[in-house]
Amino acid sequence: MAGSAADEEFKSGKGIVFIGMEGEGDKAQFNVSDEAKEFLETLQPPIAIASIVGKYRTGKSFLVNRMLLDVVGNGFQVGATVNSCTKGLWMWNKPLKCVQADGTVVNLLIVDTEGIGSLDADADHDAKIFALALLLSSYFIYNSVGSIDESALNSLSLVVELTKHIRTQSGNDAPETGETFSQFFPAFLWVVRDFALRLEDGNGDPISSKQYLEAALTPTQGFSEGAEVKNRIRRMLLAFFPDRDCVTLKRPIEDESQLQKLDTIDWGDLRPEFVEQVTGLRKKIYGSSPPKSLNGKNLDGHMIGWLAEAYSKSINEGASLNIGDAWAQVANSRNTKAVEEAVSLYSKLAAECKHSEMPLASKDLDDRHNDYTNRARKLLRQNSVGDDLDEFTTELNTKILGEYALLKDENEKLARESALEIAKATYAPIAAGVDSHAYETFKVFESARLKAKQEMLASVPDTPVKTEVLACFMESSVSEAAGKIESKRTLDSEAEMTSLKEQVSAAQHEASQTKIQLEKETGELKLREEHVRQDLEKTKESEQEAREEMEREKKRYEE
């Protein structure tokens, strides 16, 4: 391999159709392939696009495959016949990370094109291929063989056709100058293959390849029609490509029989001087390919895909490739996607909030919404192009409000669930107390309930459903507790009444028994009293009899 190698990831790629052709002749249509669009969507700026253009059968694909990609047998299609192998524009589906002189890392894309001047294509078709490659690239590499002579300049007569196929502004029919075109055209590198001349000026002093190019582009003297045509080409190249350079390469191998096998020959079998020159070419392309930009904006892969579609559509409709119109379409597409990306960012942040922070108090949720909205708007400004973004900002705001409505609904749902869980957990000890009859009166229960209510209010996020949930829960809880406490009091009253009745009955029974006992005792007392009375009567009678006896005795004694 010559010089600094391309990385293995880059070399593992393959050529894919970038802008293919469907149909034949006048009915042929240029279309950007779905595979290319999908690939481009993955690329972020800065992106450099190096397009290689040249006459068919001049080793253009070898320049791409071996010199730039450094792949053997698996690069862009190469043939050994006089037929053009590459139709339309092809793209290598792996970007190469290149570091520019200022330290900027650029994604370099390599684009190979259908060879111009082939037997099965006309000049108009070649001009379209040339224009597409020119307008889509940031580094335009023109491959030719031999030297930059009148014949080589004649092969670039397509440059004259550019003014017919390309316009820079819509609605502008006035002639446009080279300076106008140069603002939109890429850097230009002319690679001259099989160069056998000495790089020296008319005095025999050494010159650089770039100086050789500048000398070749100097208008020649003469008034013939041929000379004027060549000079016109020279003037256009000078005007269109102020950033231009040239690299000359020796013939890679002496043995002509090996020329058709260049795609598989080892670097060690090639001429050392050629290998050294390829190393220099590779370093130049890798290190100086500028990012693709339009109107001062570096394009991303999405925008490049849209630009390719806009140009292809113009060609298919038979219209000029209008850079202004294409840019308007690209800007609209880019800004539409920027809105989608901004909404996606808001949705992502909202989802993270939902899973890690919600439910939130209303004020906190509003703060999150404002923060997410500002970040989404910032992303829109970063990813959009153009100055008039009112339409897209309005679209973003409308979509964000829809997302915010969903976020608020979800927050309310989670807040309701959370409030109910907190209410149940806080009230659980009180409910247990009610069930265990710990509260003798409703007043005692109410005191405990109000204390729990304050704890709930402090714990539940301040959302619109907070008061509603707690009020409903408390209402049902109070009703249930009141019922249980009243039921307990009723049961207690019934038990107390039963006990009282039992006590009264016992007292009545005791009183009855006492009465009976008293009556019994009274009867016995009366009986004893009667016996005593009778005894007294008998005693009295005995005493009377005794007195009478004594009177009689007295009388007898006296007698």
Image: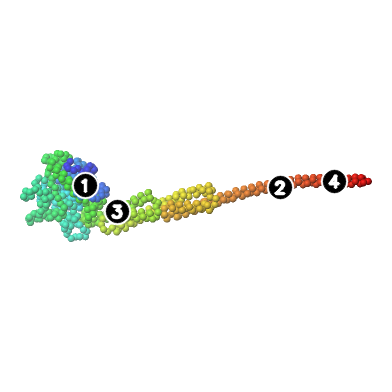
Q: Amino acid at mark 3?
A: Leu
Q: Residue at x 19, y 49 (%)?
A: 101
Residue 543: mark in rendering: 4
Q: Closer to the camera: disc 1 or disc 2?
A: 2
Q: Closer to the camera: disc 1 or disc 4?
A: 4
Residue 554 placed where, x, y %? 90, 46
Q: Amino acid at mark 4?
A: Glu
Residue found farthest to the front: 558
Q: Report the Cα–Cα distance between label 1 and label 4.
A: 161 Å
Q: Closer to the camera: disc 4 or disc 2?
A: 4
Cβ–Cβ below 8 Å for labels 4 and 2? no
Q: Mark 1 = which residue?
A: 98
Q: Closer to the camera: disc 2 or disc 3?
A: 2
Relative to residue 499, is residue 379 drawn left or right?
A: left
The one nearer the camera, 83 or 193, is 193
Q: Is residue 426 visible?
A: yes
Q: Mark 3 = which residue?
A: 379
Q: Report the Cα–Cα distance between label 2 and label 3.
A: 105 Å
